[in-house]
Amino acid sequence: MKETMRGLNQGNIQNLNRSLLLNLLRREKVCARTALAEHSGLKQATVTHIINDFMNWNLVKEVGLLTGVKGRRSIAISLNTEDLAVAGIRIARQNFSVGLFNLYGEAVMIRRTSIKHGQNAREIMDMVFHAMDKMIRQFPDKKILALGLAIPGPYNRVKGRISVVTEVEGWADIPLKDEFMEHYKIPVIIEEHANAAALAQFWYSKETNNTDVLVYVAFAQGIGAGIVNNGALLTGSTGAAGEIGHTTIDIHGPRCSCGNYGCLEGYCSSITFVKKLNEAFGKKDELTFSDAVLLVRKKDPTAVKLYMEMCDYLSIGIINVINSFNPRAIVIGDEMAHVNPTLMLERVISNVQKRVVPQTMETTSIRLSSYKQDSMVYGAAIIAINDIFQNPAYYFDPEQDPQGTDGTLHSHFRNVRFSL
Ligand SMILES: [Zn+2]
């Protein structure tokens, strides 16, 4: 029978409380048990019990003394950043990044590698493994708990594969989750890259409450959106929600590789931008994205005009997002957003204000991503950390909880160490 509704038993409640305390520790960085009880509303005894588990698991550490408001000194707790880490990988169309991160989502190391035009998915996968393996070998003392992977196309979580990536051949044939799990023997969490970045933005956002909707819009080599609702990603039934790049903005437009016609990303991606710029200057693919960025920054009128055109199309996508999800915050990021953030934001906000119902606009803020181009490699790390925080027993005490959030049996990973 398909389980559609389930009650909360003691184990689930304990997991929720553990998750709550881990997220408080993440937010506060260093915190005493009394403060954790105060912030969480949990009884002191419950907090003590859970922190004891965390200490036994080496998930948190006591890091000295904190002085409270009445001058009382209490023991400070923090997440164990010395020994524990997660791996984050972001694969984009023209480059990929690999990184190691602590449990606060702070980078230990990030490396970015370019992808040459025409390289297929299999070749890219080999390069990714090579770069990640090399980095892991540099930190032999770190225990890597999970791997987060942010990918550029709609990810079908049922099949464990990317559905389609415009511009790169072969992704749909690769069982990503299986291959990464096989190689690293740790849980692998995969999200479409805008989803990963949306969760990262939500984690660090000061303007949104837990109940708010935040939408991250990736303005890059494709256009995607990640939607966070009630603190969790809205992924859709199979993981393909938020694919605004494949919403039609012209029914008579050109055919897209997804099968649809006149898709948004065909009009305003960085790839389209470079293509149009080459056309405008009568060049044959000689100008690169870096050249395009320089031209806009030097205020070349043709380049600026084209960039504004891209921003106009993006605005239409954002207006559709606002009307669909009524978000509190829209965060625009990735490489196209950072070409000239001031111009981009001014243009988008002005377009949106002209076309969205004023009452809706009053409660919606539109801003630039707080990370630069590589926000999604942080996002990749955060989806991994989020998985650990949602179900720490799965990672640290498999006898207590052998089944993870995605239903993967922990027995796959028990007592397995890296052997690269
Ligand atoms: Zn499409």
Image (cartoon, grey):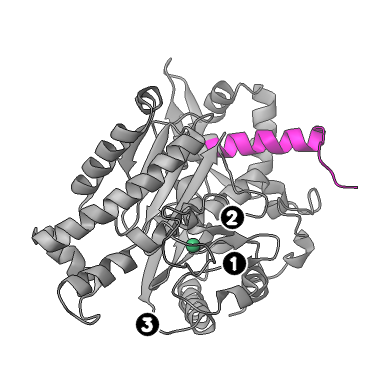
Decide which of tag 1 and tag 3 comes sooner along the chain.
3
Which is more foreground, mark 2 or mark 3?
2
Which is more foreground, mark 1 or mark 3?
1
Disc 1 and disc 2 in contact, CB within 8 angstroms? yes
Q: Which residue is mark 3?
A: 116
Residue 252 is situated, as x and y percent measured from the top left of the image, at 43, 60
Numbered disc 3: secondary structure? loop
Residue 215 is situated, as x and y percent measured from the top left of the image, at 45, 42
Find the distance from the CA under tag 1 to the CA under tag 2: 9 Å
Q: Which residue is mark 1?
A: 163
**Above or below — where is 76 with respect to 143?**
above
Numbered disc 2: secondary structure? loop
Q: Which residues are magenta?
A: 1-23
Disc 1 and disc 3 in contact, CB within 8 angstroms? no
Closer to the camera in the image, 378 or 336: 336
Q: Is residue 64 visible?
A: no
Q: Quadrant of residue 372?
A: bottom left
Q: Which mark is residue 213?
A: none
Magenta span dominant secondary structure: helix
Q: Dot 2, how many residues are within 10 Å of its Cα: few (below 14), some (14-19), or many (20+)? A: many
| Relative to 289, 318 lies left or right | right
Quadrant of the rendering where the C terminus is positioned: bottom right
Closer to the camera in the image, 75 or 215: 215
Decide which of tag 1 and tag 2 comes sooner along the chain.
1
Find the distance from the CA under tag 2 to the CA under tag 3: 27 Å
Decide which of tag 2 and tag 3 comes sooner along the chain.
3
Q: Which residue is mark 2?
A: 240
| Residue drawn at the location 13% of the way across and 62% of the way down | 302
Disc 2 and disc 3 in contact, CB within 8 angstroms? no
Q: Amino acid at mark 3?
A: Lys
Q: Quadrant of residue 229?
A: top right
**Above or below — where is 348 with respect to 44?**
below
